[in-house]
Image (tube, helix red, strand yellow):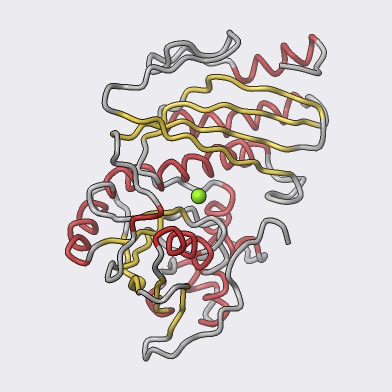
Amino acid sequence: LTEQGVDEFALIQRYFQRPAQPTVALGIGDDAALIDPPAGHQLAICTDTLVAGRHFAPDAAGFDIGWKSLAVNLSDLAAMGAKPQSALLALTLPEADASWLKAFSEGFFALAEAHGVALIGGDTTRGPLSITVTAIGMVPSGRALRRDGARVGDMVCVTGTLGDAAAALSGIDSVAMAMRLHRPEPRVAAGALLREHASAAIDVSDGLLADLGHVCAASNVGADLRDDLLPASEALLAAVPDAGIRLRHQLGGDDYELCLCLPPDNVTAAIEALAAVGVPLHVIGRVAAEPGVRLRTADGTLMPQAHSGYKHFE
Ligand SMILES: [Mg+2]
């Protein structure tokens, strides 16, 4: 911990100290943490930054920011088929506000404890509010779900539903949709099961077309999607009856669902495996040789793609 007074140091420590975790050889308290990866496993490591005013409203609830800062990273691990193990947290704070820190830590640990994730280190700095989480997971060696495994003829599938988070962000007043935006549930169990079935995977964060585009580029393929097959929640169907507006939300991103490519023969088994953990899986299109991601209507008509996703540097 740096750049803070002694009182602030104690304050921050109070909210982020948790009992030692048996899965971690050495946690918080030394210069670095130590991890013994289980035999036959690789570490999967990812990091993501959330910036106030950019990724969340400056007045967003501390609990939600704590939850989401970890959730977006666990979603990336899920997309690799990795089991989350531990995380590091770098907090940049304008001030050490006790009530905010308490709420933030409660949100962070609510999700961490649900997935057996130990906080093994971190740093705090004074500055505009920004949160960087680094997450570490375990995956059987050589078995991770990668972006470069999609093959022509694979089916494109997506877990759960799309569009609730973007609809909530657009101002539609719905508790269910607000929960999808502020407290996304990373598809960890589904990701691990899909290692047996999928050829490639990514999580839907920037928007379906952009994220699937990354898979296609890495795999040197393209994809054709059907707009009428994109799954929507009951809440979204009720709140947004206009199919065109609904589609815009479904392509808007922040869903933290998994988008997969699967050999056609594996689709039924994958749907059954995910049903056992309560996660729906929907076929939404097919991998093709022609590069790029195309959205088509049921009769095959190409749709204009006005919404290819969140661009970080625009
Ligand atoms: Mg991702």
Give above or below for 241 relative to 149: below
At a point 42% along the width and 35% down the height, the residue shown is: 44
At a point 27% along the width and 22% down the height, the residue shown is: 39
Give above or below for 149 relative to 73: below
Left or right of 172? Residue 214 is left
Left or right of 64? Residue 201 is left
**Quadrant of the image containing the C terminus:** bottom right
**Which residue is the extreme one toward the front?**
220
Q: Nearer the viewer, residue 280 or 103?
A: 280
Residue 13: image location, x then y, percent: 66, 15
Residue 157: image location, x then y, percent: 34, 64
Residue 200: image location, x then y, percent: 35, 55
The quadrant in which residue 173 appears is bottom right
**Quadrant of the image containing the N terminus:** top right
Q: Nearer the viewer, residue 145 or 21?
A: 145
Left or right of 119? Residue 3 is right
Give above or below for 145 relative to 264: above
Q: Nearer the viewer, residue 80 or 56?
A: 80
Residue 216: image location, x then y, percent: 43, 64
At a point 40% along the width and 44% down the height, the residue shown is: 78
